[in-house]
Image (cartoon, rainbow, N blue to C red):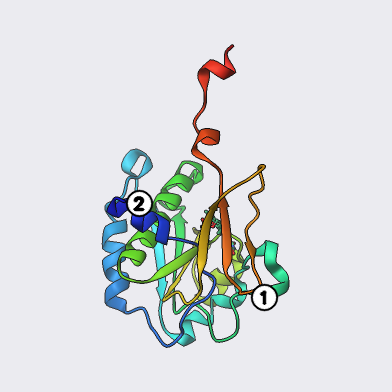
């Protein structure tokens, strides 16, 4: 298996962390140094990043994030297993008046951050479901900063397994041992078969 495939396989959406392991400012700085070099539509680079890694700052973000909508009865992450750092990604509207093309930049930045985190023995998750206004308010930020994505980070302490999706069923689930299962569609389903489509 290539190193890239190894990283991509390990880079799951973790919803349980070892709170005794902090993510250092130096680690976050290294991750963002990589993110700085990623592609940007027309190279405008309008993204801004809010970085937190102290319990006080993290507590200003966690209550406004929504986790595992499909498993809401579990109230993930469990008490005492929350992320130990966050990177909130914004589009700076003073640089990009039309933010739409830069939503792709946000995805690229987030995935780069997460792959870098996995390489450092950490892990994380993208949280798109969060209270944008609350984040701006908690950190007294101007509304020219448009919050787009929260990336939560930490040392994962849960088991996630990938499996092949069968019969089009792609819902993630947890088994009785609290192992998280993530079905992925097969490659044959993803790659368009032009002969089949155009026959
Ligand atoms: C753009 C984006 C936004 C997401 N937002 C949330 C979210 O708000 N809450 C959550 O628990 N998971 C969120 N996820 C994680 C997905 O649920 C996860 O990617 C999916 O279940 C597949 O798991 P995997 O990342 O381990 O492959 C998000 C993922 C992406 C790509």
Q: Residue at x 41, y 76 (%)?
A: 155
Q: Residue 18, labelled with which disc?
A: none
Whether the residues at callouts 2 and 1 have beta carbons within 8 Å, the answer is no
User: Relative to residue 117, is residue 19 drawn left or right?
Assistant: right
Q: Does any atom of ligand 1 lie closer than 8 Å to the CB of label 2? A: no
Q: Nearer the viewer, residue 110 or 89?
A: 110
**Residue 190, image x, y percentages:** 52, 35
- The mark found on residue 75 in the picture is 1
**On the rendering, which quadrant does ligand 1 occupy?**
bottom right
CA separation in Å, label 2 and label 1? 31 Å
Which quadrant would residue 114 be assigned to in this image? Answer: bottom left
Horizontal placement of 112 versus 37: left or right?
A: right
Mark 2 or 1: in front is 2
Q: Where 109 sits versus 81, above or below?
A: above
Q: Residue at x 59, y 47 (%)?
A: 165
Q: Earlier in the sequence, mark 2 or mark 1?
A: 2
Asked if the beta carbon under badge 1 is closer than 8 A to the nearest atom of ligand 1, the reply is no
Q: Residues within 10 Å of mark 1 (few under 14, many from 20)?
A: few
User: Which one is nearer the viewer's eye here, 38 or 19?
Assistant: 19
Front-lying residue, 50 or 171:
171
Q: Residue at x 58, y 61 (%)?
A: 181
Query: Of the numbered discs in the image, which one, if any, rests on residue 5?
Result: 2
**Residue 198 falls in which quadrant of the image?**
top right
- The answer to whether any part of residue 83 appears in the image is yes
| Circle 1: element type | loop
Q: Is residue 196 above or below residue 109?
A: above
Residue 189 position, x and y percent, is 55, 35
Q: Secondary structure at mark 2?
A: helix
């Amino acid at each position: 298996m290539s190193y890239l495939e190894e990283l991509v396989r390990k880079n799951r959406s973790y919803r349980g962390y070892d709170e005794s392991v902090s993510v250092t400012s130096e680690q976050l700085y290294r991750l963002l140094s990589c993110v700085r070099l990623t592609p940007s539509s027309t190279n405008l680079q309008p993204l801004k990043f809010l970085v937190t890694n102290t319990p006080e700052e993290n507590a200003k973000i966690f209550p406004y994030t929504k986790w595992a909508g499909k498993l809401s009865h579990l109230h993930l992450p469990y008490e005492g297993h929350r992320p130990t750092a966050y990177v909130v990604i914004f589009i700076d509207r003073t640089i990009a008046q039309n933010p739409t093309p830069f939503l792709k930049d946000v995805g690229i930045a987030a995935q780069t951050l997460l792959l870098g985190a996995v390489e450092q023995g950490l892990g994380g998750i993208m949280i798109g479901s969060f209270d944008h206004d609350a984040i701006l308010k908690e950190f007294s930020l101007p509304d020219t900063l448009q919050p787009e994505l929260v990336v939560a980070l930490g040392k994962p302490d849960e088991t996630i397994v990938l499996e092949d999706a069968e019969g089009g069923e792609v819902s993630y689930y947890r088994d009785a041992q609290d192992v998280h299962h993530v079905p992925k569609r097969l490659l044959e389903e993803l790659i368009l078969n032009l002969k089949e489509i155009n026959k």
